[in-house]
Image: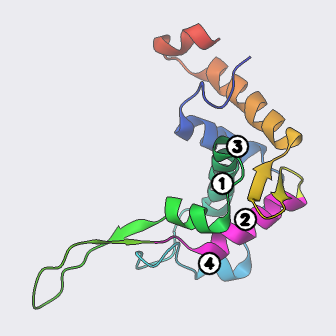
Amino acid sequence: MATLYDVPADALIDALVERLPESIERPDWATYAKTGAGRELPPEQEEFWRTRAASLLRRVAIDGEIGVDRLTTAYGDTKDGSNRYGVAPAKKTEGSGKIIRTALQQLEAEELVETAEGEGRRITAEGQSLLDDTAGDVLDDLDRPELERYA
């Protein structure tokens, strides 16, 4: 049986977007929200919210108990430090905590993740099953000879 570690992350996330429940949808305010301080514009992708939710589900499964603060660091970016008068080094910026927190709350409402008291969020058995089933289907669909040993 394939697990989420056996397939490429981008293929797993793309397949997981289709399998997430319909109740995980972009809130109205998210149309105008940037994904972090290092960005200039909000995301333009049609399925951005569901893609971010699928990515968060995978990240919580890999990292175990993880909080929003560590996730904002993981989804952060670098911001160019240069200005008109001189050159400054680039700085690390954090991702949007509101987007991450709201997506995690939606995943929690679907019982795919749960809150570990004082430790952050962790994946539930139902969430792990969804990830593993999706990984198995992705592995069957991939036409990559180097991954045949996992089938």
Indicate whether 35 appears above or below 107: below
Q: Residues within 10 Å of mark 4 (few under 14, many from 20)?
A: few
According to the picture, the residue beneath numbered tag 4 turns out to be 31
Give the amino acid type for the residue marked by disc 2 in the picture: Ala
Give the amino acid type for the residue marked by disc 3 in the picture: Ala
Is residue 102 located in the magenta-colored stretch of the structure? yes
Q: In this view, does 140 lie to the left or right of 82?
A: right
Q: How far apart are marks 2 and 4 (CA)?
A: 14 Å
Coordinates of residue 71 in the picture (x, y in percent): 59, 61
- State the SS at label 4: helix
Q: Residues within 10 Å of mark 1 (few under 14, many from 20)?
A: many
| Mark 2 and mark 3 residues within 8 Å of each other at the beta carbon | no
Magenta-colored span = 94-109
Q: Residues within 10 Å of mark 3 (few under 14, many from 20)?
A: many
Q: How far apart are marks 2 and 1 (CA)?
A: 8 Å
Image color mode: rainbow
Indicate whether 143 appears above or below 16: above
Coordinates of residue 150 in the picture (x, y in percent): 61, 13
According to the picture, the residue beneath numbered tag 2 turns out to be 103
Q: How far apart are marks 1 and 4 (CA)?
A: 19 Å
Residue 75 seen anywhere in this rendered image of the structure: no
Q: Pick whichever, 65 or 108, lies toward us.
A: 65
The answer to which image quadrant residue 117 occupies is bottom right
According to the picture, the residue beneath numbered tag 3 turns out to be 61
Q: How far apart are marks 1 and 3 (CA)?
A: 8 Å
Q: Could you tell which of marks 1 and 4 lies nearer the N-terminus? A: 4
